[in-house]
Image: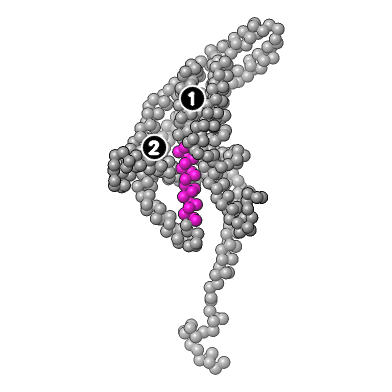
Amino acid sequence: MSQNRNVSPDDPSKLDKRQRFLPNNRYFTICIYAVTVILLGALIIRVVMTPFAVTNGIKRVLNVLMPFLMGVLIAMIMNPIINRFCFLMEKYLKIKKKKVCRILASILAYVLVLGLILICIIFIVPQVFSSITELVNSLPKMYRLTTDFFNNLQQHFPNTDMSDIQKAVNDALPNLISTIRNFASDIVPAIYTASVSIVQWVLNAIVALIVSIYILGDKKGLKKLIKVILYSFVPENYINGSIQVLRECNNIFTNFMVSKALDSLIIGCLCFILMTIFDLDYAVLISIVVGITNMIPYFGPFIGAIPGFLILLIVNPWKSLGFLVMILILQQFDGLYLGPKLMGSSVGMKPLWIIISITLGGKIAGVLGMFLSVPIGAILVYLFNLLIDRVLSKKNIDRDKI
């Protein structure tokens, strides 16, 4: 007791260890887990109780970050194109300096892509508007042709009662024409509204383009930054595995987007060529719709065929049937030959999960969300499968034997 009374309070090294705070890694880990569980629980409760507020909040965040996200997306799509150009320049032009080769390949890739976009704006967009205007102006004529068609059927088949079919068509056509007219009349205010915010869209596009150029120009620096972050927060034993997982996620996303975009471009061009050969109306407008919607796996071809079928049904019912046969053959060619050749394999998702991904993506980010939801869903499926394999391996269970 006498020794304790003589210890100076200013000398902490001589104090009893029970009087000092000693960090405990075990309790610290438990606290981290507890805080994480509480935060996740609060987030789940928030999503369940106020789903629309959460969705609106996500939309607002995405609107703010949209130029930067678009820049990342452009960079991910352009990167394999630039790599391909680099390979061709090194092989045929014998350019040995990789830095010079990559700069030239980047310039060539951006000029080519921007040139294609400019060509589409100059030549294709006016034809699309011309087709829409022509379609709206010819609605009365289409109505008369459809009515005459059923009258001729009644004359050729007098023993067949066509009254019910004709009555149903006569009741449906005015509503359909009225709907198309309303849609067409709404195009002008929509164009006006879009023109008011055209400056914002242009600025966003410029920012996205600049962001993509900086990302591709500082590719090595970004890779090093990612490695620094991994070495800072991930245990050393998991570094190589984490890098491999990130690399695979990047490959899944970029391979899908580039391959599917090329596949959709080819399908759109083939659709235009076939419609021109068979003298089908509104070839440019319908082919663009078919090509764009083809970006959605499994269900995109059916979604794209519906507008074309309805338009041709009003113009000429026989041509609409021919269009359906043509689309069916074209999509069989895409699904059985072209798609596997370009993409190598499917996205690794069942149709049910694709429907769920497309629905959620459309709710959160509209049309862009529908296009991006499938590759993002494929990445989530890949990560989930890795987690399942890891858990099963710890339990010494073979997944294939379950």
Q: Amino acid at mark 1?
A: Cys
Q: Position of residue 1 (x, y in %)?
A: 57, 92
Q: Residue at x 50, y 89 (%)?
A: 7
Magenta span: chief secondary structure: helix
> What residue sits right under mark 1 in the picture?
271
Examine the structure image and report whether residue 335 is included in the region drawn in magenta. no
Residue 169 shows up from this direction = yes
Count neighbours of disc 2 (C-alpha within 10 A) and say few if under 14, some if 14 to 19, many if 20 or more: few
Give the quadrant of residue 111.
Answer: top left
Q: Nearer the viewer, residue 227 or 308?
A: 227
Count neighbours of disc 1 (C-alpha within 10 A) and say few if under 14, some if 14 to 19, many if 20 or more: many
Q: Secondary structure at mark 1?
A: helix
Q: Residue at x 52, y 42 (%)?
A: 375
Question: Does 232 sit left or right of 154 as displayed?
Answer: left
| Residue numbers of the magenta segment | 241-259
Against 273, residue 155 (above or below) is above
Q: Amino acid at mark 2?
A: Val
> What residue sits right under mark 2 in the picture?
202
Query: Residue lying furthest bottom in this view?
Result: 2
**Disc 1 or disc 2, which is closer to the eye?**
1
Q: Nearer the viewer, residue 177 or 22?
A: 22
Give the quadrant of residue 70.
Answer: top left
Examine the structure image and report whether residue 246 is included in the region drawn in magenta. yes
